[in-house]
Amino acid sequence: MTAPFDVAIIGGGVNGTGTARDCAMRGMRTVLVEKGDFSSGTSWASSGMIHGGIRYLQYDREVTRSSCIDSGYIQRIAPHLIFRIPFLYSVLPGDRYSLDLMEVALEAYDRYQPLKGGKPHTRLSTKEALTIEPGLNPDIRGALTFDEWGIDVPRLCFLNALSAIEHGAEVRNHTEVIGFLWDAEAVAGLRVRDLRSGKEESIEARVVLNVAGPWADRVAQMAGCRVPLRLGKGIHIVFDRRISSVAITAEAIDGRGIFVMPHENWSLIGTTDDDYYGDPDRQRVTRDEVEYLLEGVARTFPGVRRHRMIRVTSALRPTLYAWGRYEDALSRRHEVFDHAVTDGVEGMLSMAGGKLASYREMSEHAANGIARKIGNSSPSRTHLEPLPGGDGQVDVEALAESTGLPGFAVCRAAYRHGSRAAAVLAPITEKPEEGEEVCVCEPVTRAEVRHAIRNEQASTIGDLFFRTRLAAGPCQGMGCALRAAEILADELGIDALAAHRLLRGFLERQWQNRSPVLEGDQVVQEELLRATFFLALGIGWAVQGESL
Amino acid sequence: MKAGEVEADVLVIGGGFAGAVAALTATERGERVTVISRAYGATALSSGAFDMISTGVGEGAFEPALLSPEHPEIALEQLFRRNPFHPYAVLTEGLGEQRTEVLLGCFDACGLWLNDCLRDAGFAAWGRARETQAVPTQAGTWRLTQCSAESVRSADFFALGDEHLIVIGIEGLAGFDAAFVVDSLRHILRRDGGARGVDLAKRIKPAVIGLRAESGLARMEPFALASRLEEPPVAEALVRKLKALGSRGGATRFVFPPVLGIDGHPVLLERIRSDLGVEAAETLSAPPHSTHGLRLQRALARALESAGVGFSPAAVKDFDADSGGVCSVQAETHDGPMTFRAKRFVLASGSYLGGGLKADPTMREPLFSLPLFVRGREVEAVDIREVLRPRFFEAQPAFSVGVRVDSDMRPVDAWGKVIYENLYAAGSILADYDPIAERCGMGVALITGYRAGGGSLTDGPPAKA
């Protein structure tokens, strides 16, 4: 008797969804489970770049080369989802690398740029650099430019999941692995629990792939295996708007390279890289981490402290284990573990390491490993077939005309949905109220929120944030979280009290992301947000007996 | 008095609820008062509820309000034991066992008096400290409070008889989903409302009317719609559409989103009552479109004007003081810098929202550099992130930081010594209470504003002439 699935994938990050897509496209019967939402772990909190990895040039040219090739593929399969980010590398007196030395590195990098459609570097005088970016420290000795690509990672993950679904896979978020099924000494599937309903069930599969990122070792241990990892914590600071025209690199106090970068409607400062020994589910961002980044960026971009920080992102890199190296010097290579070889357990593979920009290639490697186990000989086609929405252009003006939406709102929807944007926004033509901007900051229309719930497996406000960037703006959900909960109630058929619970859960989780950078104008916003939910909406308040 | 100078007996810094109450109190005591206000603050964003104190709701603390009456006297007694620095405790120091009674009485007396001041200015609220109200919100919760705007109080669960309620949705109106509101109100009624609740749940229904064409609004934002509804043809259309509903549903009371006019809301509410023979109520309002707050703020301005209080839109920049206390403040007005001299100064500049406190990231009081306190301790040069607690839905020390005062409302230092003999503070700039999580912001603003304006807790407010 054969199991209903060829492969069961644990983890809905970029590697899990990428591998699910690859397997499904090769005709394997595929199922994926993710305990949170797609991309909600390490993928989401990455820098959101499909870069070539210039920093890896100095010790791992192969990583740079393969990243650049893959970056080129991603531009072809998801052209709507990527955006060019020009970088300014400026040098201050006392910096670790001089302009000349960096230019040598960039000349080397230029050789890889054509692989990813990037422009060659240029060298700028101090005056030219200050013209492009007036906020730079006027003491800079000049600057170099180089070219990278940015991407909306949650969309990338979901589009991989959606493509997998369209190729026949079953993909479930909010579903946690609680154990394994065994056939003698071999893994034969998963025991899973739906975290919303509490319902448990068995999923039989011929092979299990563990791509649970920072949780990979914990998952492997449930099957008596190990995935040797050295977790590296990385945080980003998020600003309410784009605070510079281009991305700017800077040097942190320890000489590490960091950056401030415009990304969609935000700017990000990133990133830290620190060994992490705690519970992956209980990361807390510290003031030291925030100050480390601000201090480093302020040296090159002095105005940074005047801008408004709205939140942080934080995640753990599932880096391959190595002793005796600084965090920064750890390889970004990835590895597929066959636990039959490493632990004597048949039927289970794990993959760890790597970086966002190489996800497609990594997924191909993992799928190759699975294919070998089950005797599937189809080649990978993930670099050839476009992701959903990546197969055509959108006429933004015509869509603005037919929906009556502002051009900016249409542009954002077209960015997220590519050629499928017209279908997502189509209900507005019949019912203008579906064009209401539920989230005014981003903006996100009611039609798109409904689409995410109906067709994109969004069942919490957090899921809607990942699908649409609802509540990503400076008000942090004050204006839209209740409306999102109401639409969820309407679409999912849950009662109002359950919708209130979704609302409280979202606010509670977002507080963890807001509080590490709460200061200045954002304190005013936070006070208003509290007043809105406690006093005006009566969603919940503290108990009297609790002391201040 | 020189050009560019204003002289008054009392100068109030801050034109929100606490500042306006202080100004009105001092005026009625025969003093010449001037209010300086930089901009609208928290009052203009307030919900329409005037809370005195929350008794807490036990195990269901993080569920929407449980529908049982609160006992403010128990809450106050717990509070006096738990937090001796709370403004209610500080105000009533030395009153011994009477302190609870005095505070409850003061809330009611001040409330009545203020209502008299505001009624002519076009705003009315209703409530008593010992009579809990449960009023609906835009999220469909029943929110417990002691006092609320008159239209809100008209939907108080505890005061409703055998009413048939229709919650009116307006097509395309952002932030108000009538079906959701009704579903939520019904669930809470059935779960927490006892036999009366179960009964009322059967008699509450949603209905949606369209006003897009009549209002001429492409985007149905609450303030825009509220303004349009003051125009007779739009009000006419509303009444016409309601008539169609009323005859169908047998409704005795309509519950609207808070959009029935801004300054003209009493007229529109009265029109609905008289034309339809049906009571009209509104839910509380939520930022950023807090209609009740905007109405209150505008009515306060009119009340100050008719009481003869001077009003200056200005931002305080600096001050002068000598051994007798504060002599003057310098402020930036539309006509350039001005000096304001007074015998007494009342600082009612609010918390972070009003600009009375800053956290950049060190917490400070920007006008007089007054020392700040929380939990009875001074917080000197402390980063706000050091006083954050791990959960959103709990009281936050960071939002309880403020100025510590003596029982006359004068800011004091860590040793309890008055800093400036003639400087008083009121409202949310005060230390050691979380106006949001403890649900007592309006009550503290009312009583401390009254006290800082020179009112006596035991004598009761001056009778309105």
Image: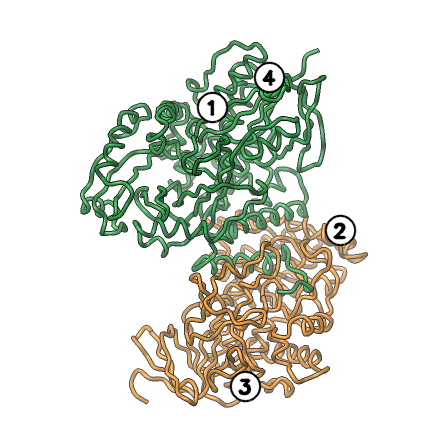
Circle 3: is it few (<14), some (14-19), or many (20+) Cα within 10 Å?
many
Return the disc, 3 or 2, that comes first in the chain's sequence. Answer: 2
Instruction: Select label 3 or label 4 by which is in front.
Output: 4
The quarter of the rendered structure image containing the C terminus of chain A is bottom right
Q: Chain of mark 4?
A: A
Identified by mark 3, the residue type is: Gly
For label 2, the residue is: B202
For label 1, the residue is: A362
Number of labels in the image equals 4
Instruction: Return the residue nearer the eye: A480 or B438.
Output: B438
Q: Chain of mark 2?
A: B
| Chain B rendering hue | orange
Instruction: Return the residue nearer the eye: A210 or A534.
Output: A210
Specify whether disc 3 shares its chain with disc 4.
no
For label 4, the residue is: A29
Task: Indicate left or right for A451 with B2 as reference.
Answer: right
Instruction: Select label 1 or label 3 by which is in front.
Output: 1
